[in-house]
Amino acid sequence: MSLSWELDGPVLLDLLEEQHIPLWSSQRKENEPIVFGGGPVLTANPEPMAPFFDVILLGDGEQLVPTFIESLHKTKGLQRTERLEYLAQIPGIYIPSLYEPQYSPEGNLIGVKPLTTAIPASIHKQTWREKTLNHSAVITPEAAWPNIHMVEVVRSCPEMCRFCLASYLTLPFRTPPLEEGLIPAIEKGLTATKRIGLLGASVTQHPQFTELLRWINKEQFSDIRLSVSSVRASTVTSELSKILSKHGNKSLTMAIESGSQRIRTIINKKLSEEEIFRATKYIHEGGLTGLKLYGMVGLPTEQETDIEATMNLMLKLKQSTPGLRLTLGVSTFVPKAHTPFQWEGVNPDAKKRLKILSKKLKSKGIEVRPESFGWSIIQTLISRSDRRLAPVIAAVRGSQNSLGQWKQIYKASRGEFFWETNNPLMHLPKPPPWEKIIFESWETSTILPWMHLEGPLKHEQLIAHHQQALSGYSETSDIQESCISIQPKVSNRQD
Ligand code: SF4
């Protein structure tokens, strides 16, 4: 199971139940399947879901899956526990049952430790350093994006906005070559469909993106429909807009995060108002009729004046480009593990700010699409909790689409009856109040549930980026240093 989004997690339990596989790894017997998973959510903070998995792969699948499968074959015939102990020695493979969270008498996490000295104390996320290139293997009208051949153009993002999991967790920024990589991948897809999707955290940052666009813009491909995920404003050109418009696009999406320059500086979004206006002009001139901007509320240090700045920016954009349909998609800041903002809590005022933005901009003819504040809270719960959330996830299954159920069950989990009835984790202290997980900003000295798992940047580097952010500092030399000082090519475990 690959989990890309926190709220995918609880669905796993439905799938296990459908297959009559015991939910808890501790309840699976010798002849039952080994349940393994990966993807960004499990690589960032697997702990809330850890008791449901026998094996978690931390990092790039190209690197890990073949090694894992090979090791499984090698251990055929051994006892289940022996197989898991063998797998635990492989870099990037995390066996949750061989680690135990430890707590202070007050119930605070003080570490997740291996059960024996034979098991590595920390696990390093694995990074694929060869040519990165993935594309759809199956093209079908039944897919979430029907009949589209998806091609991965970039992996990670060099911008390192301080909240961004897509950048921080997957560093370094990697790009496949055009001639031997992207073009053959697109040609392969064109044998099956006329719809191509270019995928990645920030696709226009591929150094040969303009060449790629010109290649697609040939006469023979005039009937191809081309989609791109969101683009960086500073990379939008008139040519890009014209080509996208010619290939079936009506609008383009740019993530500005906030209309406030102060906030953009704090989050390290290297984007000026001038660049936003220039990109908007190119989009309009290129023949696109819509522009969707992504923003966030509740970013660290945000004030009401920053929300006003976002409203003002939207209004000025509307005035400067009459005829261009403007939409603002806006979500609540959710802290993610392995990013410099992992210590920051959700701002409870975000709910009110979502409403203010919606109300005021709608009255001026700008469409606003706010994401649910309530679900951002549940995302945060899954992104920041430790293993003690697992019994809650198990209890909420079947009604995981109800916010009310999440709240009610979490509250119940803090009571004796819930915690001590049919709960394989009853030996652990009860979960903390949910305000502590969701809304509190934590000291950087706090022991985090994912600290036994090592991501691309060291803990001290994340602390430095956090401090720089909150003192309003943003510049590039530090970023380049961080990109260079990622873990060595072959990650060795350090006991
Ligand atoms: S530009 Fe976008 S993808 Fe890149 S780090 Fe910032 S938010 Fe993440």
Image: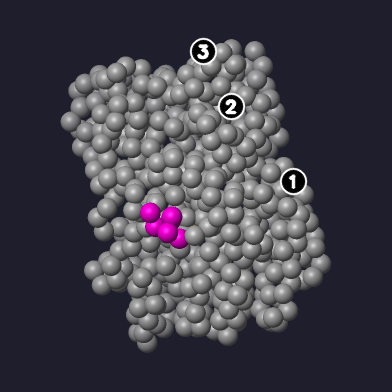
Which is in the foreground here, disc 2 or disc 3? 3
Marks 2 & 3, CB-CB < 8 Å contact: no
Identify the secondary structure beneath mark 3: loop
Outermost residue toward the left in this view: 74
Name the kind of residue labelled 1 in the image: Asp
Q: Which residue is mark 1?
A: 349
- Is the residue at mark 2 in contact range of ligand 1, meaning its CB lies under 8 Å from it? no
Q: Position of residue 15 (x, y in %)?
A: 47, 36
Q: Position of residue 31 (x, y in %)?
A: 31, 22
Q: Which residue is mark 2?
A: 392
Which is in the foreground here, disc 1 or disc 3? 1
Q: Residue at x 53, y 35 (%)?
A: 444
Q: Residue at x 28, y 67 (%)?
A: 177
Residue 427, numbered label: 3
Within 10 Å of disc 3 (Cα), the crowding (few <14, some 14-19, many 20+) is few
Q: Is residue 201 above or below residue 122?
A: below
Residue 155 appears anywhere in the view: no
Of the two numbered discs 2 and 3 on the same chain, state the one appearing first in sequence: 2
Q: Residue at x 39, y 77 (%)?
A: 210
